[in-house]
Amino acid sequence: MAAHRVAHRRLALLIAGIAGVAAMSGCLYGPPYDQLLTGDEQLLEIAREDYTDAGDQVAMAVVDGDEVRTAFVSADASTRFELGSATRGLTGLLLADSIERGEVSLDDTVGEYLDLGDAPAAALTLRQLATHHSELPQDPLGPGAWENPTPDPEASAPPDRGGLDALLGRVARIDLVPELEYNVSDFDAALIGQALAAATGTRYADLLEERVLGPIGMEDAVVVESADLLPSGLAQGHDRWGRKVASRGSGAYSPATGLVVTIDDMIALARAVVDGPFADSEALDPAAETRWPRIDIGYFWERYALDRGHAVYIVGSSAGFSAALLAEPDARRASVLLSNAEVDWPWSRVLPLLATIEE
């Protein structure tokens, strides 16, 4: 009997070892055993294909008229995610609101509101910035973007992005690049948001809360200008190589990258642009062309022509997170994805979610 127990124990250890090696080499299908998958099974089928790392945290949702389905990977409705560069979509809604109030005009130059001196960027119009036709490069994370380019090596986290003076100093040193034509740059939304703050004499975070987040009902959304504003329940971000990334404050770049949200916040945003308070916002209407034949852009919101109508969307990432919202207003449906893993093109992850409604 003792010999049988020893043999069985050796066999169990052998099987466990083989399973461990197989799992590490990607031979076993499905997520690792320490992931917790909850919610709608149809959405989880997609999650099992795309999110197989033990560190993945994901929240996803589809809105179909009055129905909402959600699913989570090692997360829940209270988990917060960085919206990253998709934050610019909220800044676009704020811009449309400010134009409607007569506070700014699309053809105003950013130099009318922000001190850029005689820098080339000072002559850029709000229209050029909001439609990503500014010819500014995408380089807000270079050393020149930080107030402290040589952070304390003993610090446990990287420094916050710089304040307004650092942002303007960085932009003032940049030469425009006409060859870029249509080019997504975080500088665009950062300058728009700070210009709106200057035009109204109100901090960007307060202005966004009063005019956009509040009316939409994004109750858990936080504009993280500095690290001490990082809320509890924030997922651990990972870069595209799977390495952990420390979250930081976005400083003056908050209008481009600074929002932290929950899945319920994003569901509220989806409803707002489908049939809610921002469904008729000019931010969603075509204002300029992009480099793609069937895609135009409003105020940071891209608009895709479909045979059955059109879709509006925002996608973005940060150092450690990805986010996307895709909505078809005419059909009253939308899909949302929040992830703690940085990917190159979140569109490819959110599109299959919307397809589950058609099925």
Image (cartoon, grey):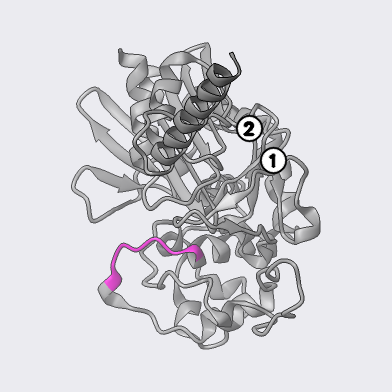
Could you tell which of marks 2 and 1 lies nearer the N-terminus?
1
At label 1, counting other C-alpha atoms closer than 10 Å, the crowd grade (few under 14, some 14-19, many 20 or more) is many
Secondary structure under badge 1?
A: loop
Quarter of the image for residue 213 reads: top right
Most frequent secondary structure within the magenta stretch: loop
Q: Which three-letter amino acid code belongs to the residue tagged 1? A: Ala
Residue displayed at 45% across by 67% down:
125
Q: Which of 73 and 85 is in front in this view?
A: 73
Q: Identity of the amino acid at label 2? A: Asp
Q: Where is residue 98 in the image (x, y as percent from the top left)?
A: 60, 50
Q: In this view, does 333 lie above or below 304?
A: above
Q: Residue at x 63, y 28 (%)?
A: 264
Give the image location of residue 224, x and y in percent.
71, 54
Q: Quickly name the residue at label 1.
A: 221
Report if the CB atoms under discs 2 and 1 are less than 8 Å apart. Answer: yes
Choose top left, top right, bottom left or bottom right for residue 93. top right
Judge whether 1 appears above or below 80 on screen: above
Q: Residues within 10 Å of mark 2 (few under 14, many from 20)?
A: some
Q: Residue 121 carries which label?
A: none
- Is 336 located above or below residue 302 in the figure? above
Is 355 magenta? The answer is: no
User: Alpha-carbon distance for marks 2 and 1?
Assistant: 7 Å
Helix, strand or loop status at disc 2 = helix
The image shows residue 87 at horizontal and vertical percentages of: 55, 49
Residue at point 35% right, 50% down? Answer: 287
Q: Mark 2 points at which residue?
A: 265
Q: Considering only vertical position in the picture, is 24 above or below 2? A: below
Taking depth in this image into account, of 192 and 4 the one nearest to the observer is: 4
Which residue range is magenta in the image?
180-186
